[in-house]
Image (cartoon, rainbow, N blue to C red):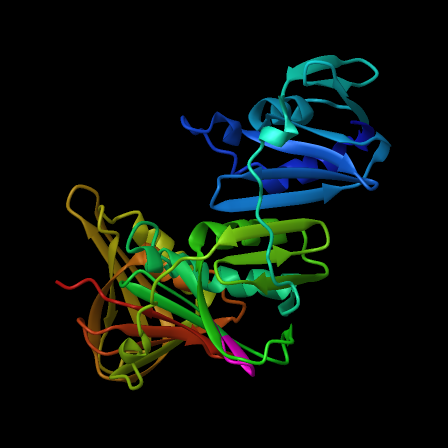
Amino acid sequence: MKFIVLNKNLKDGLRAIERIAEENSNLPILKNFLIESFENKIKLAATNLELGIISFISGKIIENGGLTIPLNLFNSIINNLQVERINLELTKNNKLSIKTDNYQAEIQGIKKEEFPIIPKIKNDEFYLKIQNSELKNILSLIVGAAAQENRPELNGILLDYQTTLLKLAATDTFRLSEKTIFNTQFESNIDKNFKIIIPLKTIQEVIRGLQFNEEGKTAIFFDANQILFKTENTEIISRLINGEYPDYQQIIPKNFETEISLNKDELIGALKLAGVFTDQLNEIKFIIKEGAKNIEVFSFNQSLGENRYLIPAKIKGAAAEVAFNWRFLLDGIKNLASENVFIGLNGSAKPALINSLKDSSWFYVLMPIKG
């Protein structure tokens, strides 16, 4: 293996894979990544056995070959080189030579045959395709509601495909987010309905990758146990979560005792200010008085003091006083593109519904903190 690569291209490729190389006492090689040149491409790959990421970058290939080397060490070197071009070469005894005009290093590697095989999708005939920027925005709207540690099926995102539309949902039992995408927003040649659960970590990596690559489209492929997200230069392949996703439709409120419409940015500011005066429960209160034209966002901490913030709002229905976890509420609204947000309340013990006044295809359900 021998090639010349632009520093920027190499950094872009490393950024795509760097977060999944893990310390593993049983398989130390998972701290490594695979670097390989073939067919005028340079391939960088990393895996934690549940999730694999492959990034393809361009360079001048002189000789094909491959090696696996410690990712953190290599990343540290590349990030501190202030040159445009870097020469990489596989030398004897499985060492990688790094050379520039004024720098030289050798890293001890392990032959590529010892690197875990990253599986491939068996059936790549059927697919979904969606614009990268659209997919990033959609996933960002729902990912915050997924459970970080819980029942395995909740530690993931439901993808519910219904030929004419696609629903994505996440819940941790305290909150729920669902986004509907209609077939005018995606391409597909799949002619039957199905449901799969995608691990949260996988979705987070997809979002992260799309932040640097909003142009073009993502193709999504499936088989019985795996999912592949494929863009022009990156492939993310992951195991699916086995299990039955909970039937959440029954908890979605349809009618409301109190309806509020208010400015999203002002609400975000109020929540952040109120959060300064909360304790480990992150509790804030919405106080809506009879006939009022604003809502009061209130928080109190015995050792710090209290906070009150009035937000102008259009209010319909009964007076109310409802407590929420402000961080959970912020997660639900921070990625909204619309200027205003709707909040529907049904007293202090029943779930509230939040959505965009301009986009009925998304909603967020949040349980109050019971007093």
| Above or below, comparing residue 89 to residue 247 in the picture | above
Residue 57: give x, y in percent of width and height: 75, 41
Q: Quadrant of the N terminus?
A: top right
Residue 196: give x, y in percent of width and height: 45, 66
Task: Determine the residue positioned at 20% across, 62% down.
Answer: 369
Q: Is residue 217 left or right of residue 150?
A: right
Is residue 331 something one can see in this rendering? no
Q: Is residue 340 left or right of residue 75?
A: left
Task: Determine the residue positioned at 71% across, 30% down.
Answer: 66
Is residue 18 something one can see in this rendering? yes
Residue 161: give x, y in percent of width and height: 50, 75
Question: Is residue 164 within the magenta segment?
Answer: yes
Q: Quadrant of the C terminus?
A: bottom left
Task: Determine the residue positioned at 28% across, 79% down.
Answer: 250
Task: Find the residue positioned furthest to the left.
Answer: 371
Q: Quadrant of residue 182?
A: bottom right
Relative to the observer, which residue lies in front, 205 or 242? 242
Q: Quadrant of residue 258?
A: bottom left
Relative to the observer, which residue lies in front, 169 or 356? 169
| Above or below, comparing residue 187 to residue 118 in the picture | below
Residue 68: give x, y in percent of width and height: 63, 28
Task: Determine the residue positioned at 33% across, 67% down.
Answer: 244
Residue range corresponding to the magenta coloring: 160-166
Count of numbered labels shown in the rendering: 0
| Above or below, comparing residue 128 to residue 233 in the picture | below
Question: Is residue 351 within the magenta segment?
Answer: no
| Above or below, comparing residue 169 to residue 257 in the picture | above
